[in-house]
Image (cartoon, coloured by chain):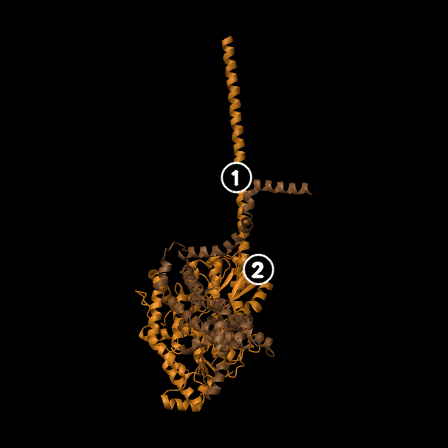
Chain colours: A brown, B orange
Amino acid sequence: MTQTTTSSTERLVAGRGIGGFGERHFKYTVLAPAIFILLLIGLFPLVYSLIVSFQRVTMMSADTSFAGFANYAKLFADARLWESLLHTAIFAAIALPLELVLGLAMAQLFLERMPGRQVFVALLVLPTVISPIVAGANWRLMFDHRFGPINQVIGWFMGEPTPILWIINPLTVYPAILICEVWQWTPFMFLILLAALSNVDKSLTEAAEIDGASQWRIFTRIVLPAIWPVMAIAILIRGLDLVRLFDIVWSLTRGGPGTMTETISYYTYVQGFSQFEISYTAAMAFLVVALLTVIVTLALKRMGIAR
Amino acid sequence: MSKKLIGILVAIAIIIVGGIVIYNQQQEAVRIEAEQMAAAQATAEAEAAAKAAEEAAKMAEEAAAAAASAMDAADRAVEAAKQYAGTTITITWEAGLQSLDPLNFSGPKWKELTGIDVKVVEIPTAEMFTKTMQEFRASTGAYDALNVIPAWMPDLANAGALEVLDPYVDKYGFRDELQMIAPTYRDNQMTVDGKIYGFPDDGDVFVLYYRTDVFGDPANQSEFKAKFGYDLAPPKTWQEFRDISGFLTEKFQPNMYGAGFFREPPYVMYMFQERFRNEGGKFFDPETMAATINSDIGVRVFTEMRDENKMMPPGVETWGFVENLAAFLNGQTAMTISWPPYGRWAAGYGLEQEAFSWVPKSQVAGKVGYALPPGGHPQLAAGFALSVASTSKNKDAAYLFIQWLNSEQTSKQRVQLPYALRDPFRTSHFESAEYIGRWPEAKQYLDTLKAGAETGLLDLSLLQTDKYEEALRQAISRLWAGEDPKSILDQAASQWDATTQEVGVDAQKAVYGSWAAKSGAYPR
């Protein structure tokens, strides 16, 4: 036994002497292929897009010459681009708080045990699992001025037919997109917040109640801080999703009337796949990446979840 | 003595040597002569053989030509294509009803005739250009034959995505049959810079459909004449259209309206192009290439289009192809303007087929008349041409398939397929006795299509056409949203100018000049 142990130690010591470098870097050697593949998949397209953004690549011509900062300079003169960013910000600024508040309210409602709770939760989550393009198409039917149930219901209340042109009229087109967006993604907030609320320590809220704290005070001082880390992540995910808002706009309005509901994603699509401005599209993508990096960094700091 | 003897011997030797030399020369001469004679004989024989072979080849050629002249372009394509039996060619086709032609009819028939399989790639119209360009740029060779909207042809040809078809046309004897395509399509939708890039294969043209029972009603006629001072008849001007549409709407709404049009921007873009030119508008200043769609004519057309919506069913601003069709087939509108299939379906032709389960049963069969839209120069809106992809690995087989599809023989059958949406485009189609017998008013229908083909206006076709069209689509969308026509068109014109600058004024000017010189560019 002693003999065996000695031999092993010797081998180990000898190994250190001969293969010390390999052993010290063993973890890097093992990780290297995975890191290389990840860089290849993740970084290569990014670097390639960056290169393309400095070229003159369009699908209409074979010219791929160096364009310098021409595409980036064009960004600043493109009013339609900045309008689309503004539209995106408007959608995010309205939809995100609505989804958060409604999701939280629903989660609070379903926190208590009630008959059929599981069935209701499952039904409420259904919109989230539908493809956004399908959701948009369904809502287009719902908003149809002749056959859509929405105008019909409004007509019952008004006492006469009300052919509201939801996706044509500038006054109703934003509400139409927002209704569809909020309908589809509030359940996501609901589900995440329901899970967060379920984990709040009941003894704390009960103690506060015994001490005579109001429900609002309990919510703001105990519940909200407890669920905040989860809620912040949910806000971040939905916020980023809203920046990418495309499918619902495509299905409902095609960015119209005119360019009134064009989001940055929709406009990027138009430039890339309809106008074939590949290099300009790449420059737009980098502008969005830069803006998002700044916003997300600020948001993470502000939310206190970056620590 | 000895000297004498030596002299004699030398003389004898000289005589012998000389004799030998002379003999040898004679022998050589004989040999050469014999060789020359043999060579001459061989040459003569070879010449005779070559002549015989040439005569035989000539006879064979004459025999082949005689046999070929007995065949038409379709048969020639089939015969030539048999050598490619067992291969597969891929063709792009508009998704939906259009593609039922190669899926249900022409594809299987081609396979039966030649042994060549046809794979159909269905693509939505809006993505056809993108997909074609993407595959070309990637040099995948994924498509062999293509359906191309003629307005895209300059862009695709300049990019190199389309094969020049002239050599194939000559090789497979299609030039004569190409001449039989109706002149508007043949002269305007086939070539770029004098080279053939596609065969016009769809006689798309806007037609005014109207209710003959409503227009022929004596009460309507007398009331209308009393009010406007002229006979109630299909409108020849937009003023007449407004009179008639307003009159019928006022009298029959909400059960029936004077007119209904599709109003989705991609369709109205064609209607605007048509109406703007009928009213005398020009798209550009030919000298400076400055956009002139925001001229007084453009603003007037836009304003009238918006105002006419009030004479149509509520919510018409959202109507697309199907909504407009449904309203007309259900008898909710007395007039509409659309592509030729509306006429066939309104007559109930082929609607019993499963492919038409989505089309409402026509309530107006036998009550529909056909006329040219107001202005008399209808838009040859969209349409399709058949081309060969330059990156195809089966160019000859692909070419032969499109020659066969486009030939007199095959196309006559294809334009009568109720579901396929290919409209008459050859002179013979308009005169086909078989087609005329399809429904009672088919002759009037075909006559109207023919008249439309003779006077029709081409879609605007430039470098990067879609950017100009996109600006128009946006403008129309804003028009329905209630914005001021003048400011909308000013903005659209500035977008056009920006695109022209981007493309290059001189380059675009050359392309526009070439387009504007075509017979169907502006009314003549």
The residue positioned 52% from the left and 77% from the top of the image is A209
Left or right position of B269 against B64: left
Q: Residue at x 35, y 76 (%)?
A: B485
Instruction: Residue A213: give x, y in percent of width and height.
Output: 49, 77
Q: Residues within 10 Å of mark 1 (few under 14, many from 20)?
A: few
Q: Amino acid at mark 1?
A: Ala
Rendering coords of residue A105 (x, y %): 51, 76
State which quarter of the image contains the C terminus of chain B. bottom left
Does B359 sit left or right of A58 as displayed?
right
Q: Are marks 2 and 1 in contact (CB under 8 Å)?
A: no
Pick whichever, B115 or B154, lies toward us. B154
In this view, the residue farthest toward the right is A1
- Residue B250 lies in quadrant: bottom left
Q: Which of the labelled discs sits on residue B40, or is there none?
A: 1
* Image quarter of residue B397: bottom right
Residue farthest to the top, as pictured: B1
Going by the picture, which residue comes out furthest to the front?
A211
Mark 2 or 1 closer to N-term? Answer: 1
Check the image and report above or below for B113 versus A175.
above
**Viewer-proximal residue among A16 and B400:** A16
Residue B222 % position (x, y): 40, 91
Give, as a three-letter code, the residue at label 2.
Thr
Measured Cα–Cα span from mark 2 to mark 1: 55 Å
SS at mark 1? helix
Residue A118 shows up from this direction: yes
Mark 1 belongs to chain: B
Residue of label 2: B88
Give the class, few, some or many, for how many residues have Cα within 10 Å of label 2's Cα (few <14, many ≥20). some
**Does the image show residue B385?**
no
